[in-house]
Amino acid sequence: MRRGIIWLLTAVLLFGTPLLTYAAGSGELDLTQTGSIEVTMKQEEVVVPGGTLTLYRVGEIQQKNGDYSFGLVDDFADSGASLEDITSPELAEGLADYAQVEKGNTLQIDENGNVMFDDLELGLYLVVQYDAAEGYENVNPFLVSVPVHINGTY
C-alpha cells in the first residue's frame, strides 16, 4: 500500500487582463481580477487519480501604504491565526483544524490526477484533503495565494 502522496501545484493562473494591472499608473494591484488554482496529484511522477480536495478562502488582500498583505476572512477571523508567515506549514495545519468542511468547495480529483478551482477572488486559499485516493493518505494542507508572487512578478 502506498502511504504518502506528493502533490504538484501546476498552475496558479489569472484570467483576463495581464497578471499585474496598474490602476492609472498608481502601482496598485487590480483587485477585480479572478484566478484559478490547479493541482496535479502525483507520487514519484505517477499520476494519482481519485479522492477529493477542498478549498477555503482564508485571507483577503489588504493594502496599506502601497504594500499588500492578507487579513483573515470572516469565516476564519476567530481562528486566532496570524497570516504574517503564509509559508508556514503550522499555519496551514492550524487553519485546516479550524476549517468547517461544509464551508469549503470540494472537488473530485479526475482520472489524470487533476483538480481545478476557477473563478476565484484574489486572496489566500487553504487546500485540504479529507478523502484520499484509495491506498493513499491525505496530503498535508497547504496555502496558495492568488495571485502568486514569484521572482518579483505577480
Image (spheres, helix red, strand yellow):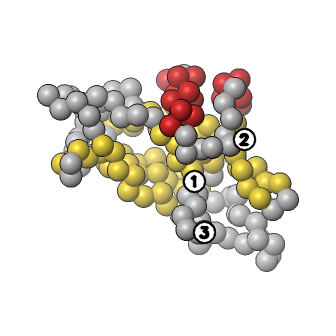
- Report crowding for label 3: few under 14, some 14 to 19, many 20 or more residues within 10 A (C-alpha): few
Quick check: 149 above or below 23?
above
The answer to whether 29 is drawn above or below residue 93 in the figure is: below
Residue 107 occupies quadrant: top left
Q: Nearer the viewer, residue 63 or 80?
A: 80
Quadrant where the image shows the C terminus: bottom right
1 w.r.t. 120: above or below: above
Q: Which mark is residue 146?
A: 1
Residue hosting label 2: 71
Q: How much space separates mark 3 and mark 2, taking CA atoms?
A: 21 Å
Residue 99 shows in the view: no
Residue in the image at 21% along x and 48% along y: 44
Q: SS for tag 1?
A: strand
- What's the amino acid at mark 2? Gly
Q: Residue 70: percent from the left, percent from the top?
A: 70, 46
Q: Residue at x 77, y 59 (%)?
A: 67
Which corner quadrant holds the N terminus?
top left
- Alpha carbons under labels 1 and 3: distance apart: 14 Å
Q: Badge 3 is on which residue?
A: 152
Assign a secondary structure to mark 3: loop
The image quadrant of residue 151 is bottom right
